[in-house]
Image (cartoon, rainbow, N blue to C red):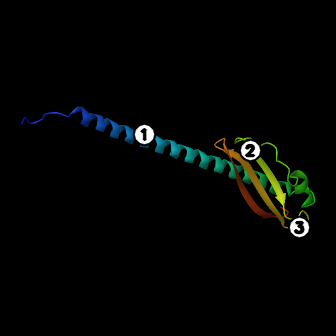
Amino acid sequence: MKPSRGFTLLELMIAVVIIGLGLLAMLLANTHIQRTGEAAYERVVATQDAHRVIEGMRNASTNGSFPANVIVSYPQGAAVPGFANLAGEQVVVTYQNVASDPLDVTVTTNWLELGRRNTLVRLRTLMTKRN
């Protein structure tokens, strides 16, 4: 028998298939990591938008009689205008009791995560008149 000095066609085809599957796995992992990063970014933006509404409410609490001035500026269950950072984004403020002091506030941000799935972030805080 002669010693072989190279690869057979079958060995080369198996090697190409294995390398192709490895590259496909790397591509799918990269796509998954990218989508996860985008979803995390959207969640951060939604949380920041809710914090902006809470800060606006705290600033509104300095003018007029509390809590009526905050409730007039940010009505119960109505969408807060000016938020379009995410696909289908809507920021809504709700109160446990509109006459209480401190005011129990929940800010909910809804959006379409990655343009497909309805997602929300809720922040709850207690608020009183700011001097």
Which numbered disc, 1 or 2, marks the residue closer to the eye?
1
Q: Secondary structure at mark 1?
A: helix
Q: Classify 74 as above or below 127.
A: above
Residue 24 numbered mark, or none: 1
Q: Residues within 10 Å of mark 3 (few under 14, many from 20)?
A: few
Which numbered disc, 2 or 3, marks the residue closer to the eye?
2
**Which residue is at a point 38% across and 40% down the rendered structure image?**
21
Quarter holding residue 57: bottom right
In the image, 39: left or right of 78? Answer: left
Q: Say whether residue 10 is visible.
A: yes
Rounded to the nearest angstrom, the CA distance separating label 1 from label 2 is: 34 Å
Q: Position of residue 83 (x, y in %)?
A: 76, 43
Q: Position of residue 102 (x, y in %)?
A: 84, 67
Q: Position of residue 43 (x, y in %)?
A: 65, 50
**Which residue is at a point 73% across and 59% down the rendered structure image?**
123
Kind of residue at badge 3: Ser
| Front one among 25 and 112 | 25
Q: Secondary structure at mark 2?
A: loop
**Which residue is at a point 51% across and 42% down the rendered structure image?**
31
Quarter holding residue 93: bottom right
Query: What number of labels is visible?
Result: 3
Kind of residue at badge 1: Leu
For the C terminus, the image quarter is bottom right
Kind of residue at badge 2: Glu
Which numbered disc, 1 or 3, marks the residue closer to the eye?
1
In the image, 73: left or right of 121? Answer: right
Residue 89 numbered mark, or none: 2
Q: Identify the residue under disc 3.
A: 100
